[in-house]
Image (cartoon, rainbow, N blue to C red):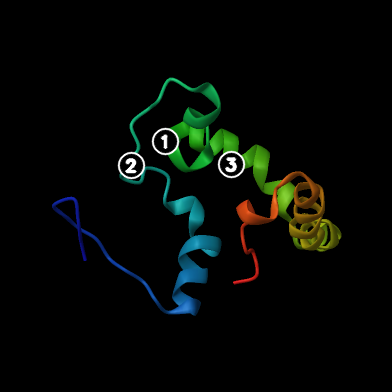
């Protein structure tokens, strides 16, 4: 695949994607970034945009929060997020402006 005049490898095999994105993730510290720093400290410090030692430091902080056990505890909260948003927004939006969220 060509992306902005650079040759890129596209991976479609789920097993290989898991290997790259989960098991070998620490090996991919300095990826090419198409994002230009915006000056927004929150956006500029997102893990995806960090490089080098700063990337390793932030990843070390975040990783313990995404263990299998913690994700299992959060799953019910995450399942209810779309319903909570729909219930809170529905009364405030006129019928002719409502977005059909059942795709």
For the residues labelled 2 and 3, the Cα–Cα distance comes to 17 Å
Q: In this view, does 102 lie above or below 73?
A: below
Classed neighbour count for the residue bearing mark 1: other residues with Cα under 10 Å, few (<14), some (14–19), many (≥20)? some
For the point 85% across and 62% down, the residue is: 76
- Displayed quadrant of residue 70: bottom right
User: Looking at the image, do the residues carrying marks 3 and 1 touch, with CB atoms under 8 Å apart?
Assistant: no
Which residue carries the number 1 mark? Answer: 51
Location of residue 91 in the rendering, given as x and y in whole percent from the top left corner: 80, 49
For the point 49% across and 78% down, the residue is: 15
Mark carried by residue 33? 2
For the residues labelled 3 and 1, the Cα–Cα distance comes to 11 Å
Location of residue 59 in the rendering, given as x and y in whole percent from the top left corner: 58, 41
Q: Is mark 3 on a helix, strand or loop?
A: helix
User: Looking at the image, do the residues carrying marks 1 and 2 touch, with CB atoms under 8 Å apart?
Assistant: yes
- Displayed quadrant of residue 78: bottom right
For marks 3 and 1, the one nearer the N-term is 1
Q: Is residue 39 above or below residue 29?
A: above
Task: Name the residue nearer the viewer: 44 or 87.
Answer: 87
For marks 1 and 2, the one nearer the N-term is 2
Which residue carries the number 3 mark? Answer: 59
Classed neighbour count for the residue bearing mark 3: other residues with Cα under 10 Å, few (<14), some (14–19), many (≥20)? some
For marks 2 and 3, the one nearer the N-term is 2
Mark carried by residue 34? none
For the residues labelled 1 and 2, the Cα–Cα distance comes to 9 Å
User: Looking at the image, do the residues carrying marks 2 and 3 touch, with CB atoms under 8 Å apart?
Assistant: no
Location of residue 81 in the rendering, given as x and y in whole percent from the top left corner: 77, 55
In the drawing, does residue 92 fall left or right of residue 24? Answer: right
Mark 2 or 3: the one toward you: 2
């Amino acid at each position: 695949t060509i992306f902005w005049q650079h040759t890129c490898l596209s991976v479609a095999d789920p097993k290989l994607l898991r290997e790259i994105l989960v098991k070998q993730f620490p090996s991919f510290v300095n990826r090419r970034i198409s994002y230009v720093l915006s000056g927004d400290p929150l956006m500029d410090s997102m893990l995806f945009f960090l490089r080098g030692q700063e990337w390793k430091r932030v990843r070390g902080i975040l990783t313990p929060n995404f263990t299998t056990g913690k994700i299992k505890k959060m799953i019910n909260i995450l399942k209810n997020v779309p319903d909570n948003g729909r219930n809170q927004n529905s009364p405030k939006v006129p019928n002719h402006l409502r977005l059909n969220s059942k795709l």
